[in-house]
Image: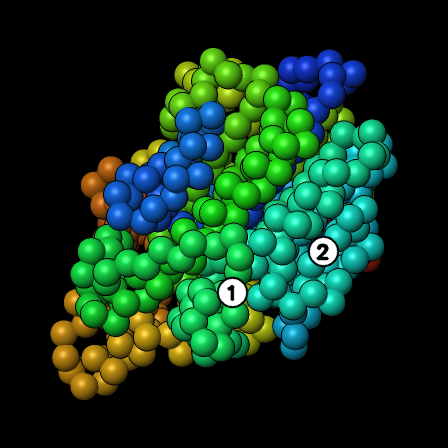
């Protein structure tokens, strides 16, 4: 990628060597093993596992007792399709090419040459299956042996929220006589908002399948309803009746997701695979509330992560302070199966994983390392161009807003939500919003945002212009630039320059300044 002087190539080489050394081959390749990966859709920390005492999630609670619970896990991008592409490739969205949503007019897809996890596994003799929301493309890159998704013609409401149907598909997959080890990916559509597409079912489709007239009936679901006055309002959400009502609806769909997890784990048990299956649970991005999804504040990129290994029972029920990323999931699964990541190039650049296997953390809590994560975001919907790059360590976070002269955009289903309309209407009428920001501040952001998480966990005070933090700012800028270089980021020169990497600059890509004042 771009040339920034001596030391950059050395950094990248050392990084890749360290990653290779950390790819621990913990188990014999002959050992029978499988993987079950659950991915929630805009799910957050609304579970007792993460100290939410109101939202009832008994099956996640039970899974946590058989897992290492990661307290500091993060998505690498705060948008549905790009995040799923990162989960299934181990590559950040700017490297794999899925810059925004896959569906409808957005139509983003990964590069044809990307080697995804299901394809690598299939080539190595592992059977692959996906049930529920897929939301990535093209099919040639994300090809599964068994596929029951919205891209196979199934209504997303059924295949992603009807937990009885999802259970039946899981039973079908797990009952196969195929002797190969397997990866089964379960993509829930809960607790995604649905007021934009299916308003008759409520803000979060909390009424879908509840047995009321016109709502249908999901046989295995016992709906749990919540009193808006009792929900726990996150610090980044305004505490108003409208927001509380949305949170109560969200809780109902999280409880449905939880019951779905219980049903599928039961199918795993009945099929006799509990004792040889690595089970993981996470989400794609932050919850769909202000400051959440599509943002790279912690409220948009912090994620739940449970990893349950039958080979690491000594750490069951433990919490880990290791900083993990969703790009760690592909190397974790490959490590579990004892499969190396292939050598190949993409857009003339060598591809290397910058994530690392989580299996060593299941053996013992690390005393060093695991203290930095990175994230990148370009778009959500096609109209929402707002590229950001982030480095986050235990104390500081740096956000680079590359298009900060334009306003931050609001996506369609959040805009129409009761929560956002409440903020908008209160702002227009001059009423108190009961929010920790103004909409103007939310829309218009500085190019650089630096936060001290020890003193400011809600990220309310930007320190980028404070001279006392000049060295911290400089160091973090250098770190994020090195990561962009290591991941072949096409935005590496943005917003101040143009990347020249062909013709005269083919062998020495260079950022050429535009003198635009940025």
- Residue drawn at x 31%, y 71% is 419
Query: In the orientation shown, which residue stands out farthest toward the bottom?
Result: 429
In the displayed structure, would residue 363 be above or below residue 441? above
In the displayed structure, would residue 206 be above or below residue 316? below
Of 81 and 128, the residue lying toward us: 128
Total number of numbered discs in the rendering: 2
- Residue drawn at x 43%, y 54% is 222
Could you tell me which secondary element the residue under label 2 belongs to?
A: strand
| Residue contact between numbered discs 1 and 2, judged by CB atoms under 8 Å | no
- Could you tell me residue 365's position as x and y percent? 43, 18
Q: Is residue 403 visible?
A: no
Of 378 and 311, the residue lying toward us: 311
Of 384 and 160, the residue lying toward us: 160
In the displayed structure, would residue 517 be above or below residue 174? below
User: Would you name the residue on which mark 1 appears?
Assistant: 217
Q: Quadrant of the C terminus?
A: bottom left
- Could you tell me residue 336's position as x and y percent? 67, 25
User: Would you name the residue on which mark 2 appears?
Assistant: 148
């Amino acid at each position: 990628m771009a040339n920034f002087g001596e030391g950059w190539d050395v950094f990248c080489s050392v990084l890749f060597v360290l990653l290779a050394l950390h790819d621990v081959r913990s188990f014999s390749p002959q050992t029978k093993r499988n993987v079950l990966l659950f991915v929630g859709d805009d799910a957050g920390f609304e579970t007792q596992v993460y100290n939410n005492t109101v939202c009832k999630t008994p099956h996640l609670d039970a899974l946590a007792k058989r897992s290492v619970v990661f307290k500091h896990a993060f998505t690498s991008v705060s948008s549905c399709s790009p995040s799923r592409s990162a989960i299934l490739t181990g590559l950040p969205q700017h490297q794999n090419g899925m810059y925004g949503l896959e569906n409808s007019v957005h139509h983003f897809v990964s590069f044809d040459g990307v080697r995804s996890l299901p394809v690598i596994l299939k080539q190595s003799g592992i059977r692959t299956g996906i049930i529920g929301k897929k939301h990535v493309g093209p099919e040639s890159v994300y090809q599964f042996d068994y596929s029951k998704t919205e891209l196979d013609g199934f209504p997303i409401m059924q295949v992603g929220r009807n937990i009885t149907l999802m259970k039946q598909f899981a039973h079908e997959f797990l009952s196969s006589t195929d002797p190969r080890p397997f990866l089964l990916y379960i993509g829930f559509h809960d607790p995604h908002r649905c007021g934009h597409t299916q308003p008759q079912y409520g803000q979060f489709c909390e009424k879908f399948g509840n047995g009321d007239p016109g709502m249908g009936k999901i046989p295995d679901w016992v709906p749990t309803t919540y009193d808006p006055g009792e929900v726990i309002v996150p610090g980044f959400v305004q505490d108003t009746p409208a927001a509380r009502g949305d949170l109560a609806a969200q809780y109902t769909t999280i409880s449905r997701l939880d019951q779905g997890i219980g049903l599928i784990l039961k199918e795993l048990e009945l099929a006799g695979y509990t004792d040889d299956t690595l089970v993981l649970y996470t989400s794609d991005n932050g919850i769909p509330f202000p400051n959440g999804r599509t943002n790279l504040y912690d409220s948009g990129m912090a994620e739940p992560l449970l990893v349950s290994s039958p080979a690491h029972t000594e750490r069951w029920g433990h919490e880990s302070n290791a900083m993990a990323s969703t790009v760690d999931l592909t190397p974790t699964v490959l490590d579990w199966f004892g499969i190396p990541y292939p050598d190949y190039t993409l857009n003339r650049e060598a591809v290397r994983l910058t994530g690392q296997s989580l299996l060593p953390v299941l053996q013992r809590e690390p005393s060093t390392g695991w203290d930095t994560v990175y994230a990148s975001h370009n778009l959500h919907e096609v109209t929402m161009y707002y590229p950001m790059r982030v480095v986050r360590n235990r104390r500081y976070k740096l956000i680079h807003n590359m298009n900060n002269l334009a306003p931050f955009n609001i996506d369609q289903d959040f805009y129409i939500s009761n929560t956002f309309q409440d903020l908008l209407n209160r702002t227009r009428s001059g009423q108190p919003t009961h929010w920790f920001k103004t909409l103007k501040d939310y829309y218009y952001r500085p190019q650089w945002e630096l936060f001290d998480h020890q003193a400011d966990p809600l990220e309310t005070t930007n320190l980028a212009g404070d001279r006392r933090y000049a060295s911290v700012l400089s160091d973090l800028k250098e770190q994020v630039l090195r990561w962009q270089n290591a991941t072949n980021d096409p935005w590496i020169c943005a917003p101040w320059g143009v990347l020249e990497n062909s013709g005269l600059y083919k062998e020495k890509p260079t950022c050429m300044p535009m003198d635009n004042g940025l």
